[in-house]
Amino acid sequence: MKALVISGGGSKGAFAGGVAQYLMQEKQCEYDLFLGTSTGSLLISHLALQKIDKIKEIYTSVNQDSIFSNCPFTIEKKYGVHTIGINHWNVLRNFYRGRKTFGESKNLHKLIKNTLTKEEFEILKNGPKEIVVTVANLSLNQVEYKSINDYSYEDFCEWVWISCNYTPFMSLVRKNGCEYADGGLGNMVPIEEAVRRGATEIDVIVLQTEVTHLNRLPSKNAFSLLTTMFEFMLDRIEFQNIKIGKYAAGHNKAIINFYYTPTVLTTNSLVFDKEKMTAWWQSGFNYAKYKNTELNQIEPEKGEVL
């Protein structure tokens, strides 16, 4: 069984889309299992449908309004770098309404339902491929994996949305008596789950550099500090997920092919810039092409990790 795993990474998901486009259209890879976390969960349904041009158009045209129904921060671009500040009015309005987060991402939920139709959902559910998204159950303190085979259209769209909700900046969702948030809070790169579901060869797209190349600028405000802290924690989670995934793959004699970002794409993945995301998509495609050109003579042994 061959699987495609796409990590979380917010706006950096455009890079993953480019990598996946090369693997599926140029390398002719066919996957039985698609497994995603956060932004990865937005990609996998359309990839499984082979509707790559459709998801590319979506990813390279979204902006803050496409995601947030109540955006908790302001964005300032100076010297080509985006910095965020607190939108005090929107944050206070959210708290006044009794919400538990700084902002709301209900527009993203609408976008998911507008772009994945009921007909497409039925094709996937009745087809041979399995689509799985990762969510974090904060009430039960555990990571859960939601397969398209187990849910209705409405429920599955909601699980995809939940997988992307980067709390406390985006919506906290109460479902089935529990509070749910971004799957990346527990598993940024669900390689182990792919192995557990029977994958013997796994292409993994990690929306982070393989080696740390980052020296962050000092935080300018509370939101800047929060995003820096969350990025630090998610980086650590990602590192552990990959380490555990490699161990699980080796123990089960599965092959893993990693695709990391070759450079730091952004220091704030909550900023959705059309121009940059279009460039990142092409960059992902070019990087996958370059890597496969370099490795096309290498035939890995069982259990080998590239």
Image (cartoon, rainbow, N blue to C red):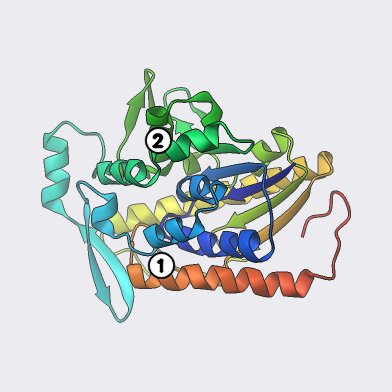
Residue at mark 1: 277
Residue at mark 2: 118
Instruction: Check the image and name the residue furthest to the bottom.
Output: 79
Image height check: is 72 above or below 61? above
Q: Secondary structure at mark 1?
A: helix
Quadrant including the C terminus: bottom right
Left or right relative to 259: residue 176: left
Left or right relative to 145: residue 104: left
**What is the three-letter code of the residue carrying label 2?**
Lys
Image height check: is 248 above or below 207? above
Please tell me which residue is depicted at 48% across the width and 27% down the height of the picture.
Answer: 141
In the image, residue 25 lies at what x, y percent? 62, 62
In the image, residue 224 lies at what x, y percent? 31, 59
Q: Please state the total of marks drawn on the protein image.
A: 2
Q: Quadrant of residue 109?
A: top left
Image height check: is 154 above or below 266? above
Please tell me which residue is depicted at 45% across the width and 47% down the height of the picture.
Answer: 42
In the image, residue 148 lies at what x, y percent? 52, 32
Q: CA distance from mark 1 to mark 2?
A: 27 Å
Quadrant including the N terminus: top right
Left or right relative to 17: residue 199: right
Q: Callout 2: 10 Å neighbours few (<14), some, many (20+)?
A: some
Compare residues 238 and 206 and report the one nearer the observer: 206
**What is the three-letter code of the residue carrying label 1?**
Met
Q: Are marks 1 and 2 in contact (CB under 8 Å)?
A: no
In the image, residue 234 lies at what x, y percent? 50, 49
Of badges 1 and 2, nearer the viewer stands: 2
Q: Secondary structure at mark 2?
A: helix
